[in-house]
Image (cartoon, rainbow, N blue to C red):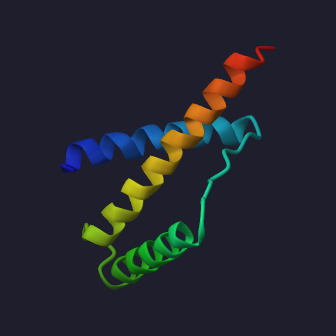
Amino acid sequence: MDDDLLDTYLSEIHKLIELLSVNDLYLPIFINDAAQKKEYITTLSKSFRQLNNFPNKRNQHTENFFEQELDRFLVNVTLLYEAVNKNPI
């Protein structure tokens, strides 16, 4: 993923999180099974390790973590969208 696209994704996620938190709404993060949980923990720990050692340098582990989060985020947003459209206020 190129830097501009990653920056755009992160910016959009930040805007959505701000919008949700202002309205006291929180998206759940679904981790489906033990393998996905292990992958999440492993990727997150590698990302933190790299960020701790090199705080101002982009690294593959952090990029991998955000890719996984974006995948989960898209699933969650889709579920929320479908729920809202199924039961409009």
Q: Position of residue 50 (x, y in %)?
A: 34, 80
Q: Is 20 on the left-hand or right-hand side of 67?
A: right
Q: Residue furthest left?
A: 2
> Which part of the image, by quadrant, shows the C terminus?
top right
- Against 38, residue 15 (above or below) is above
Question: Which image quadrant is residue 56 in?
Answer: bottom left
Looking at the image, can residue 56 be seen?
no
Total number of numbered labels?
A: 0
- Against 29, residue 8 (above or below) is above
Residue in front for this viewpoint, 11 or 75: 75
Give the residue displayed 25% in from the left and 66% down from the top: 58
Q: Position of residue 86 (x, y in %)?
A: 72, 18
Give the residue displayed 56% in from the left and 70% down from the top: 37
Give the residue displayed 47% in from the left and 54% down from the top: 69
Residue in front for this viewpoint, 19 or 66: 66
Q: Residue furthest right?
A: 89
Give the residue displayed 52% in from the left and 76% down from the top: 38
Looking at the image, can residue 18 be seen?
yes
Question: Which image quadrant is residue 59 in?
Answer: bottom left
Q: Position of residue 27 (x, y in %)?
A: 66, 44
Q: Is 81 on the left-hand or right-hand side of 47?
A: right
Q: Position of residue 25 (x, y in %)?
A: 73, 40
Q: Is 69 on the left-hand or right-hand side of 85?
A: left
- Against 60, residue 73 (above or below) is above
